[in-house]
Amino acid sequence: MKKILTIIFLSAALQLHAQKFEGLALTPPMGWNSWNTFNTKISEDLVKHTADIMVSSGMKDAGYVYLVLDDGWMSKERDNNGNLVADPEKFPHGMKAVADYVHSKGLKFGLYNCAGTLTCAGYPGTRGYEYQDARLYASWDIDYLKFDWCNTDGINAKEAYTTMSKALKTAGRPIVFSLCEWGTNKPWEWAAPVGHLWRTTGDITAQFDSLRNEGTWVSNGTMWIVDMQVGLQKYAGPGHWNDPDMLEVGNGMKPSEDRAHFSMWCMLAAPLMAGNDITKMSQASRDILTNKDAVTIDQDPLGVEGFRYTAANGLEVWAKPLSNNNWAICFLNRSSSPQKINFDWQKENIYDSVSKQQFNASASYKIFDVWSKKNLGNTSSPLSAEVPSHDVLMVKLSR
Ligand code: GLA
């Protein structure tokens, strides 16, 4: 009896402290976001066209379901009641009509705002309007909110994001809450009860392994972002993910670099938010984004982020434990020349400290190459291969 009462008390206490909607984002969210390609040049037509293509291109079937409008969807002023207003030129039928269209395609719809007084692009921020904005989003049937961190001088990040999380909860519609605080205040240490994903870094840019000077700040090439994930593995899990920013596949890197970038996001159990113009996407970009074997690694229900196992001379080996004691292994060549590998599985000791999963070196796992779709034998003999520059060999091991 005492035990039952304790369980009832504990679950009631947990409910009281549960700030966010639980059960959302049990695997990393997947979708498309307007920012990386369109900045603030967004419109109802763009949303409709993108939604149509998400369905017809196979993106939706591959798992990309959230269509998210980033900064620039609002008018510069709130209305007389203090409500946010969708820019009437960009969205002549209002935002509810846009949400309805997206929903009619079997997709989900998301919007952006900011914890500060203004968004990064200078539109009205949510500071002081958290509950009112949350009610508006719920009335428009929004499914996802990305919440940025510009113009927040003097604000405590944990408090600001907690307030918005509570406002969403109070408004009553289950909304995935995506924190975009750039890792400044280590959200991985406090955001799991507050949101479903949190950015770990500043903005990404479509460069492979370099920084880009943006004037007053720098954006990060894909491999710089990968380096910044090291040490954060233990903070991610079902319902609460490290977010290394949106994808740059199709935005100007070489196909091999896009493939390496995408593979690493899958190894990291990262949210997969495409950031290219999918209405004009090349077959190469489409093939990368919709590679079901890669996506399945990202979306594995065990929900464990991969980790860097070894790194030497620009060649890195990353490992991700998967359900059923399977593994994903990614050989990543960051160097400017091809690299030969001769990986003797039986001599390796691959252990994941988060899931406590151990690679069984004496067992024979089947090896499947996720990109060539070929079986590469099994782990009883060493794997010999050449990995081209700025590319990967990504395999799934199963028994
Ligand atoms: C910040 C975010 C980006 C994007 C822009 C919009 O830079 O980190 O992802 O949302 O703001 O202005």
Image (spheres, helix red, strand yellow):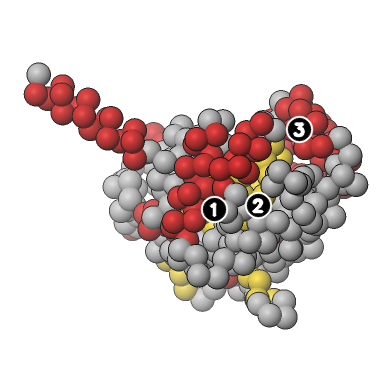
Question: Please, is residue 203 above or below residue 366 in the view?
Answer: below
Q: Residue at x 45, y 40 (%)?
A: 20
253 vs 89, nearest the viewer: 89
Question: Please, is residue 199 above or below residue 81 in the view?
Answer: below
Q: Which mark is residue 51?
A: none
Q: Position of residue 79 (x, y in %)?
A: 76, 47
Hey, which residue is sitting farthest top in the picture? 1
Residue at which label 3 appears: 96
Q: Nearer the viewer, mark 2 or mark 1?
A: 2
Q: Residues within 10 Å of mark 1 (few under 14, many from 20)?
A: many
Q: Residue at x 15, y 24 (%)?
A: 5
Q: Nearer the viewer, mark 1 or mark 3?
A: 3
Q: Residues within 10 Å of mark 3 (few under 14, many from 20)?
A: some
Residue at which label 2 appears: 113
Indicate the amino acid at tag 1. Answer: Leu
Q: Residue at x 42, y 41 (%)?
A: 19
Q: Are marks 1 and 3 in contact (CB under 8 Å)?
A: no
Indicate the amino acid at tag 2. Answer: Asn
Quadrant placement of the N terminus: top left
Looking at the image, tell me whether mark 2 or mark 1 is earlier in sequence order: 2
Question: Please, is residue 73 above or below residue 107 in the view?
Answer: below
Hey, which residue is sitting farthest front in the picture? 80
Hey, which residue is sitting farthest left in the picture? 2
Quadrant placement of the C terminus: top left
Residue at which label 1 appears: 179
